[in-house]
Image: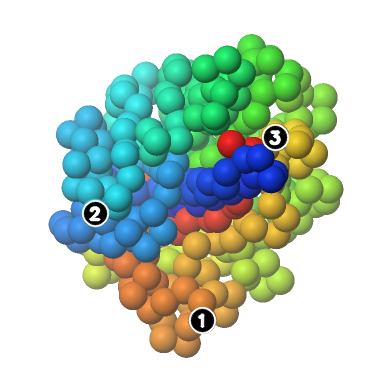
Amino acid sequence: MIKKYLLIAFLFISSSTFCQTEIKTMFYNLLNFPTATPQNRNVILKNILNDYEPDIFMVCELENSTSADEILSFSLSDIPKNYNKATFTPNQSSSGTGSNLQQLVYYNSAYFILDNQEEILTNIRDINHYTFIIKTTDYLTNPIFLEVYVAHLKASQGIANENLRLSMATNFTNHLASLNSNSFVLFAGDFNFYTSAESGYQQILNTSNSIIIKDPLNLNNNLQNWHNNFSWRNIHTQSTRISSSEFNGYGAGGGLDDRFDFILLSENFISNSEINYINNSYKSYGNNGNCFNNRIDNSDCNGTFSQTLRDNLYNMSNTNSTSKYAINYLSFPVLLHLKFKS
């Protein structure tokens, strides 16, 4: 598994007759929450969330409904927004290693109504699908739906693991056929892709899919090698640590050198007049672009993202190399902005 998180921010901007509303979303792999060390990660997570205040918060690696409730009642409690959450449903796709881990979405109910949720079964972990209605001024008569998918694809290198990621990605793209072809879709998660040449990545972006999905950092779908590549240092999301020894084996080391966390979006976000992706707004939250193969809290990695935030990301991030679980990788959020007329 791999730990990451991604952030997406939706900027709802008006014309002269519309009001302006900003919506921010975030994906984060929480690393066996709350079991993994240190024990106060509910507090660490609160500090991270207070720094960004997302309106849609998408997560992986929740262990149970109790931990899901704890995030809502405690980690999100300082933010002056009306948070709610989807229903936590235990993973149904597997009974093997890590099968107790699940995805979930938290959301600002002032801006979104959760209309429906379902789990798409795969050979590893569920892919969670949430349908939201955006609270525009006329949503009762002319609703705009936002389809949010959250996934945690199979981790680790090797053709067998790549094929498992492809199988999960295919389950997602097959499900797109059940939606209206004009649907607005976000697909976020810890995808564990090492390069864009991977078959699973290519499956998601295949232009023959019923809904075309785009990568905001690779809109032309050119082949890119993100793994241990200095040229992509600005968008790497893992690993926040060099070693996991001080965390009782939780959290893979190696330093910041991979892009495992993603927020992908349907092509209509790029051209539609109601909801748009804001160019160049996709960022790796906490990555100042100067921490290649280093730990994220190193004082040499200073910049826009503060030392305090990077300290929290270092302590919170996901991965574990113990025998109990598959390998997880530490990561941090990614930002992406959209705009729509409210």
Q: CA distance from mark 3 to mark 2?
A: 32 Å
Q: Is residue 123 visible?
A: no
Label 1 vs 3, first from the N-terminus: 3
Report the side of 46 relative to 115 (left or right): left
* Closer to us: 214 or 233: 214
Extreme-top residue of the structure:
178
Give the residue type that dot 2 points to: Asp
Report the side of 73 relative to 204 (left or right): left
Q: CA distance from mark 1 to mark 3?
A: 34 Å
Of the 4 image quadrants, the one containing the C terminus is top right
The reply to whether discs 1 and 3 touch (Cβ–Cβ < 8 Å) is no
Determine which residue is flagged by label 1: 303
**Quarter residue 92 falls in:** top left
* Closer to us: 228 or 60: 60
Give the residue type that dot 3 points to: Glu
Q: Residue at x 64, y 58 (%)?
A: 281
Of labels 1 and 3, the one closer to you: 3
Determine which residue is flagged by label 3: 274
Relative to 309, say whether 2 is above or below: above
Report the side of 174 relative to 115 (left or right): right
Q: Position of residue 273 (x, y in %)?
A: 76, 36
Label 3 vs 2, first from the N-terminus: 2
Determine which residue is flagged by label 2: 78
